[in-house]
């Protein structure tokens, strides 16, 4: 029977953070960077739709993470914390680029005059990718982001609530309204164009 060597086991995020904060050894932070850089970059690409911006954003986000690492209090997982930083950074970039305030459909109130109707998840999940991308690009950035968190990143409602610092019921309402808005945009874009088979 072979004994397991603790040195070969990969250290947890918490262990790496504690070691880095104690020793300032860049090797520990580099391990965290390697673990999460790909995910952060992928999230930046999804939200910013620009390779160069996403690369720059990834570097800036990790500088922010490094500077704020001592503030990480482990109330959430490190991955949720870094996701929150990534999301907020990208939303700020989108806001600056468009020079408009970030608006969620919940901030506007009721969508149109129609009563609120639950749009099934399947409506979004069954859209052709190119059509879905066009629909998402026409949504307000906040609505796009919340749908991406729910359906692409597969985050739970409680995790989205933590990232956005809102209640779970507010997140459910935002998702419902963002789906309604997406359905409305889809109908507007493709109403006369039959679904591809």
Image: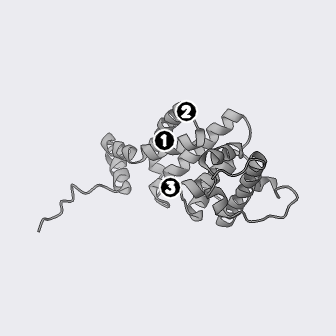
Which residue is found at the position 77% from the left and 50% from the top?
191
Residue at the spot of label 2: 53
11 or 39: nearer the viewer: 39
Mark carried by residue 41: 1
Mark carried by residue 80: 3
The answer to whether marks 3 and 1 mark residues whose Cβ atoms lie closer than 8 Å is: no
CA–CA distance between discs 2 and 3? Answer: 22 Å
CA–CA distance between discs 1 and 2? Answer: 10 Å
Secondary structure under tag 1 reads helix
Task: Name the quadrant containing residue 122.
Answer: bottom right
Q: Where is residue 113 in the image (x, y as percent from the top left)?
A: 88, 58
Which residue is found at the position 72% from the left and 34% from the top?
99
The answer to whether marks 1 and 2 mark residues whose Cβ atoms lie closer than 8 Å is: no
- The single residue placed furthest to the bottom in the displayed view is 1
Q: Position of residue 192 (x, y in %)?
A: 78, 48
For residue 71, above or below residue 64: below
**Classed neighbour count for the residue bearing mark 3: other residues with Cα under 10 Å, few (<14), some (14–19), many (≥20):** some
Q: Position of residue 159 (x, y in %)?
A: 56, 61
188 or 105: nearer the viewer: 188
Q: In this view, does 117 lie to the left or right of 120?
A: right
Secondary structure under tag 3 reads helix
Secondary structure under tag 2 reads helix
Q: Is residue 172 left or right of residue 188?
A: left
Q: Which mark is in front, 2 or 3? A: 2
Q: Is residue 174 left or right of residue 51?
A: right
- The single residue placed furthest to the front in the displayed view is 197
CA–CA distance between discs 3 and 1? Answer: 15 Å
Specify which label sits upstream in the sequence, 3 or 1: 1
For residue 86, above or below residue 74: above
């Amino acid at each position: 029977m072979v004994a397991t060597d603790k040195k070969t086991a990969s250290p947890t995020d918490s262990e790496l953070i504690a070691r880095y904060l104690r020793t300032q050894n860049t090797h520990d932070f580099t391990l965290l960077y390697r673990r999460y850089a790909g995910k952060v970059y992928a999230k930046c690409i999804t939200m910013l739709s620009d390779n160069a911006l996403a690369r720059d954003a990834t570097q800036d986000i990790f500088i922010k993470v490094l500077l704020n690492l001592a503030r990480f209090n482990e109330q959430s997982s490190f991955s949720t914390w870094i996701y929150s930083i990534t999301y907020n950074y990208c939303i700020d970039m989108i806001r600056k680029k468009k020079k408009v305030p970030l608006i969620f459909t919940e901030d506007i109130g009721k969508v149109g005059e129609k009563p609120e109707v639950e749009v099934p998840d399947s409506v979004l999940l069954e859209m052709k990718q190119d059509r879905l991308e066009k629909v998402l690009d026409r949504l307000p950035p906040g609505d796009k982001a919340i749908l991406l968190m729910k359906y692409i990143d597969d985050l739970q409602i409680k995790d989205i609530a933590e990232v956005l610092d809102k209640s779970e019921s507010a997140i459910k309402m935002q998702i419902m309204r963002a789906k309604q808005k997406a359905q409305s945009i889809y109908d507007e874009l493709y109403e006369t164009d039959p679904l591809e088979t």
